[in-house]
Image: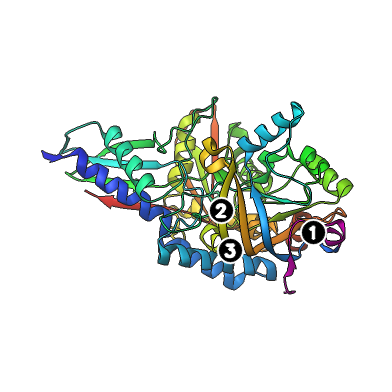
Amino acid sequence: MRKVSAEEITKTVRALCISAACDLEPDVVAAVKAAAGSEESPLGKEVLEQIINNFEIAGREHLPMCQDTGIAVFFVEIGREVQLESSLEEAINEGVRQGYKDGYLRKSVCHPLKRTNTGDNTPAIVHTTLVEGDKIKIKIAPKGAGSENMSRLKMLKPAEGVEGIKSFVIETVSVGGGNPCPPIVVGVGVGGSFDKSALLAKKALLRPVGTPNPDNEFDALEKELLNSINALGIGPMGFGGTTTALAVHIETYPCHIASLPVAVNIQCHADRHKEATI
Amino acid sequence: MSEPVKIAPPLTDAVIEKLRAGDKVLITGVIYTARDAAHKRLIALLDEGRALPFDIKGQFIYYVGPTPAKPGAVIGSAGPTTSGRMDAYTPRLIELGLKGMIGKGQRSQEVLDATKKHKAVYMAAVGGAAALIARSIKKAEVIAYDDLGPEAIRRLEVVDFPAIVVNDAFGGDLFEEGVKKYRRVG
Ligand code: SF4
């Protein structure tokens, strides 16, 4: 067994919170740059250039690229041979507390009804899985509300099949319009149960933008959906244009014979994700 | 692309009448910030027949909740938030003389009707371009509801703050027109 202390997890999480907010990952930067090259609307192109300029300022001056530094969502893979010396969630929350304070990030978490701010951006949302080995892999994907609020889930009838999935995804993007700060990345979870489909949709967003789906059939469906979404004309910030989405990512799981859950998690261009291994 | 129009609040009807959906603008002068929590309090004040914490006539409200300022900085990152959350409160403020709103995303029909009736404009700033936009903010001061933290009402002094007219006072709508132009399906 390998012992991992709470301090080590906290320190790692603190650093991940700050770097995720300020430095965009190269896959997203490359996708927005490619979109700026192909966008047909002059205004849309200008918007994309402003977005690129903003990434660069944020990275260089170490400022949050967006003021909505999000609710902190984590995916943690814990090796079976790791012995945790404290509660994982407490160590992560302490890292969030420190990262959001020391990084001058916005605290955006509140009581659901009273709306009183918790003051330190905790609690985080933590998803854990057990894997082989003696390492802990921590992925952070802070999520702003503009795009999260445009996400939807529907329990389709199995008879609706792939056509039902397509129309629900396209309808969800249409309803969102300019609200989720397009260009967006669309995470789709197909199958599982009500809860599992939402988690699949969120996980789908973790796949680097520009990498293909390993399953040929779903890869083709992703490409088809991307074309249909970009034919909607919503464009950068909803001002009209040929770039509404940068990518569509699908994750699937077997489901009950009587159901077909579909979840669509919309991610804005401030597609922040970082990972570290302890 | 056409050159941006320079405007300076407080805005008169004459300035509003010149703006059209799709125009790029650069705003220089004072603008106020407020999000949903602050709007709720503003409307509560009006319901009680009390005065607002600032004179709203001719002014702009920017829907933003900035990140905390780093030491020595005027403000943190400060991009627009989704305007739709303010829709329920906005028509009343427009009736009282609010002339401009800056945010992102679509507005309700009630807001659009009020902008036409009382000559006001809705503009969008580029969502997520928060570090870039912050550069145009030269001074920031909390003038009400400090307890709301990022949602407090701030008085900002801006120079060449970049925005795009989405809804003009004549019913022009950039979202509708822009999307129609690039739509390639049914
Ligand atoms: S949707 Fe994304 S880019 Fe837009 S304001 Fe929210 S976090 Fe920022």
In the picture provided, is B135 more to the left or to the right than B24? Answer: left
Residue A68, position in %: x, y?
A: 51, 48
Q: Which residues are magenta?
A: B1-17
Give the CA distance from mark 3 to mark 2.
11 Å
For residue B135, what is the image quadrant?
A: bottom right
Residue labelled with disc 1: B177
The answer to whether A187 is drawn above or below residue B157 in the figure is: above
Residue labelled with disc 2: B140
| Mark drawn on residue B136 | 3
Q: Secondary structure at mark 1?
A: helix
The tag earlier along the polypeptide, 1 or 2, is 2
Give the CA distance from mark 3 to mark 1.
29 Å
Q: Residue at x 62, y 34 (%)?
A: A159
At label 3, which amino acid type do we have?
Ser
| Chain of the residue on which disc 3 is drawn | B
In the picture provided, is A31 more to the left or to the right than B87? Answer: left
Residue A224, position in %: x, y?
A: 59, 56
Looking at this view, is B26 or B152 the one in front?
B152
